[in-house]
Image (cartoon, rainbow, N blue to C red):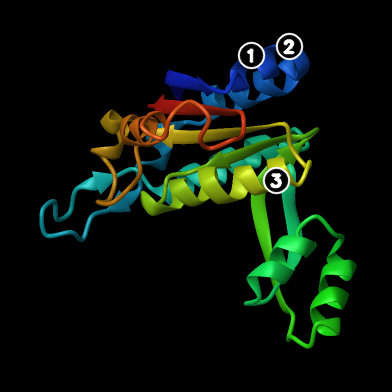
Amino acid sequence: MRIEAKYSHLNGEEYLLVHRKQLWDEVKEVIVEVDAMACRTKVSREKTMPGKMLFSPTDMNRAFKDGLKARGWSERRSTFWLTADEKLMRGIYGLSEKEQKRAIEEAGHEPIMSYNQTDFVKERVAVEVQFGKYAFVAHDLFVKHLSFYVSDIIDVGVEILPMKELEREMSSGVAYYERDLLNVLRQGRGVPAVPLVLVGVTP
């Protein structure tokens, strides 16, 4: 694959070039190593394109996972506890996992465990590869990357997306770079409040 387009939000790419150039180079190397044509394995069952060979999100994700894991990138989870009490939630957000649970119990509420998970993290850089449905990208940008940034786990997030050119050759409803670039731009300069690099890839 190759990088067709990229967008640096809140100087995300500039941060990588200055502080984590080796990691940024690794991400670009993995993209180049992914053989997109070898991932054209999905037979369409959709009414609009029956029998057509499409690019498989599963196969492309696996190729990215293999490349990143081989370079030491790994999953990271951040666990936290929830309750319906807004005031209590605001007061415990910055506490440790154990302290959050204790505070909820002491307030007489039932603690609910939850977590945020990012597929690939290395040296405070997170990478999400998104060939799934378009709604997942907003979750990546406005929940995953932002939560890990606010929690001081990462300094920048990278979101890898298909360009429209590639999305046309996939199942319907898949996210694509051009649309999600607009979704970020129309929020204004500071939203989401996390340095990001959006990367659009093509075969």
Q: Residue 52 vs residue 26: left or right?
A: left
Tell me the amino acid under the disc marked 2. Answer: Val
Secondary structure beneath disc 3?
helix
Residue at horizontal 41%, vertical 51%? Answer: 132
Indicate which disc residue 94 carries.
Answer: none
Mark 1 surroundings within 10 Å by alpha-carbon count, few (fewer than 14), some (14 through 19), many (20 or more): some
Do the numbered discs 2 and 1 sit on residues whose CB atoms are within 8 Å? yes
> Percent x, y for residue 123?
80, 33
> Percent x, y for residue 83?
67, 76
Residue 184 lies, with reference to residue 148, above or below; the image says: above
Secondary structure beneath disc 2?
helix
Q: Cα distance, mark 2 to mark 1?
A: 6 Å
Residue at horizontal 53%, vertical 46%? Answer: 142
Foreground residue among 63 and 106: 106
Residue 198 lies, with reference to residue 48, above or below; the image says: above
Residue at the extreme front of the image, as rendered:
87
Q: Quadrant of the C terminus?
A: top left
Question: Which residue in the structure is indicated by mark 1?
Answer: 14
Q: Residue 79 vs residue 140: left or right?
A: right
> Percent x, y for residue 128?
57, 41
Question: Which residue in the structure is indicated by mark 3?
Answer: 148
Secondary structure beneath disc 1?
helix
Question: Which residue in the structure is indicated by mark 2?
Answer: 18
Tell me the amino acid under the disc marked 3. Answer: Phe
Mark 2 surroundings within 10 Å by alpha-carbon count, few (fewer than 14), some (14 through 19), many (20 or more): few
Tell me the amino acid under the disc marked 1. Answer: Glu
**If you read the primary sequence from the N terminus, does the residue marked by circle 3 or circle 1 appear first?**
1
